[in-house]
């Protein structure tokens, strides 16, 4: 779709569908092409729009240097996500292209989703719902279907950023859970606020050995890619539950499956996978000890709208020559 805007307008390529009100804000000022390269029928239009593009806005698609080389006028990439693992940071810096993202507006919603996975796995909610739906609830349930308490258990958070801290608040202040966390730097007490006396920075080894729930909220980087491997799962406490709320590629999925199949891990709650959408032949899709979600961490009406508004603000500011606060890479 194309719309002609005011003279001197920039060319904007929208590579994932935006809510109509945010698309209209961009169309009022700029020439807009909407083409989602994940849809095969729109891929050619996406590629055709690259040579004129001054700005890109979208998400869930890897923009490689080879693709971006075809966009010589590009000034800004505005991602409708907080994670920036789909973008070549050094390349963008090298070309002086601003990369903006959406930190903060999705933090609490994503922490809610992660906590829901902790409850669903530990209390076996999916199995119990299935029992009722399938008509097999014919007598009181017994120990074979009991779950394990969540309150009071120790949660270990790998990556104590915005989402990690929001999860820690839910766990410590709402469910009386001791919090261990590991990130490269301890979080200052002033940032932790009321969590400071309740959350302890520990080594990765101590966290894996002591946590009842190991929860991944780390960014995907070359350091963290595949860092949750067979050795990491073996180091977890027998009966631990693993939750991934950040990126699938941080996990060696074959090693996770082996740890579940051996009975070493009790369960896994996964919002993210190495390949998304999850391939139909992935054993994680139907594994009885896995609660899989379709990358739904931030997927509420309110939060997806807030992300779209912030990403649109970022795009329009950067095209107007003002670098917004949410820029992660710029010249
Ligand atoms: N499931 C979903 O729908 C969503 C998933 N996400 C994912 O969650 C991630 C986190 O988001 P957010 O909390 O806002 O981001 P932040 O940048 O606030 O947090 C990321 C944390 O990762 C830590 N980290 C980075 N490298 C390492 C490492 N090698 N070892 C340990 N910790 C590390 C950082 O701490 P330090 O630098 O001190 O190590 C930082 O605290 C995003 O990058 C995204 O991938 C985000 C939103 C929704
Ligand atoms: O995965 C979602 C994000 O915002 O990053």
Image (tube, rainbow, N blue to C red):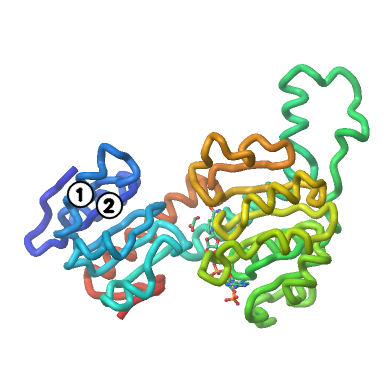
Q: Quadrant of residue 189?
A: bottom right
Label placed on residue 14? 2
Secondary structure found at label 1: strand
Q: Position of residue 139 (x, y in %)?
A: 90, 20
Q: Nearer the viewer, residue 298 or 256?
A: 256
Vertical side of 327 occupied by 232: above or below = above
User: In this figure, what is the number of numbered marks?
Assistant: 2
Q: What residue do we see at 30% from left, 80% from top?
A: 331
Vertical side of 317 occupied by 27: above or below = above
Q: Position of residue 324 (x, y in %)?
A: 35, 72
Q: What residue do we see at 61% from left, 57% from top?
A: 251
In the picture provided, is 91 more to the left or to the right than 54? right
Q: Residue furthest left?
A: 7
The answer to whether marks 2 and 1 mark residues whose Cβ atoms lie closer than 8 Å is: yes
Q: Position of residue 207 (x, y in %)?
A: 77, 69
**Disc 2 or 1, which lies upstream in sequence?**
2
Secondary structure found at label 2: strand
Q: What residue do we see at 77% from left, 25% from top?
A: 131
In the picture provided, is 48 more to the left or to the right than 302? left
Residue receiving disc 1: 33
Label placed on residue 49? none
Q: CA distance from mark 2 to mark 1?
A: 6 Å
Q: Quadrant of the N terminus?
A: top left
Report if the beta carbon of the residue with label 2 is closer than 8 angstroms to ligand 2.
no
In the picture provided, is 114 more to the left or to the right than 319? right
> Local crowd at mark 2 within 10 Å, few (<14), some, or many (≥20)?
many
Q: What residue do we see at 56% from left, 50% from top?
A: 272
């Amino acid at each position: 779709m194309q719309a002609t805007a005011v003279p001197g307008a920039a060319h904007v390529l929208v590579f994932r569908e935006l809510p109509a009100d945010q698309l209209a804000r961009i169309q009022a000022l700029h020439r807009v092409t909407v083409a989602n390269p994940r849809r095969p029928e729109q891929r050619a239009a996406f590629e055709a729009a690259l040579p004129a593009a001054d700005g890109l806005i979208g998400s869930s698609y890897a923009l490689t240097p080879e693709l971006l080389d075809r966009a010589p006028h590009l000034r800004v990439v505005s991602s409708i996500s907080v994670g920036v693992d789909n973008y070549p940071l050094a390349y963008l810096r090298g070309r002086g292209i601003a990369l903006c993202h959406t930190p903060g507006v999705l933090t609490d919603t994503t922490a809610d989703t992660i906590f829901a996975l902790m409850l669903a796995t530990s209390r076996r909610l999916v199995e119990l719902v299935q029992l009722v739906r399938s008509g097999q609830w014919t007598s009181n349930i017994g120990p074979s279907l009991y779950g394990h308490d969540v309150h009071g258990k120790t949660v270990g958070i790998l990556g104590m950023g915005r989402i990690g801290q929001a999860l820690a608040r839910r766990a410590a202040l709402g469910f009386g859970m001791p919090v261990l966390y590991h990130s490269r730097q301890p979080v200052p007490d002033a940032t932790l606020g009321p969590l400071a006396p309740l959350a302890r920075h520990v080594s990765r080894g101590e966290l894996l050995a002591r946590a009842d729930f190991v929860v991944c909220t780390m960014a995907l980087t070359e350091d963290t890619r595949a860092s949750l491997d067979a050795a990491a799962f073996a180091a977890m406490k027998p009966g631990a539950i693993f939750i991934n709320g950040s990126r699938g590629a941080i996990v060696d999925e074959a090693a996770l499956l082996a740890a579940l199949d051996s009975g070493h891990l009790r369960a896994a709650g996964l919002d993210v996978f190495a390949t998304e959408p999850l391939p139909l032949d992935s054993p994680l899709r139907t594994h009885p000890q896995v609660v899989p979600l379709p990358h739904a961490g931030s997927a509420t009406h309110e939060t997806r709208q807030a992300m779209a508004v912030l990403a649109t603000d970022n795009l329009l500011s950067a095209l107007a020559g003002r670098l917004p606060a949410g820029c992660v890479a710029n010249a």
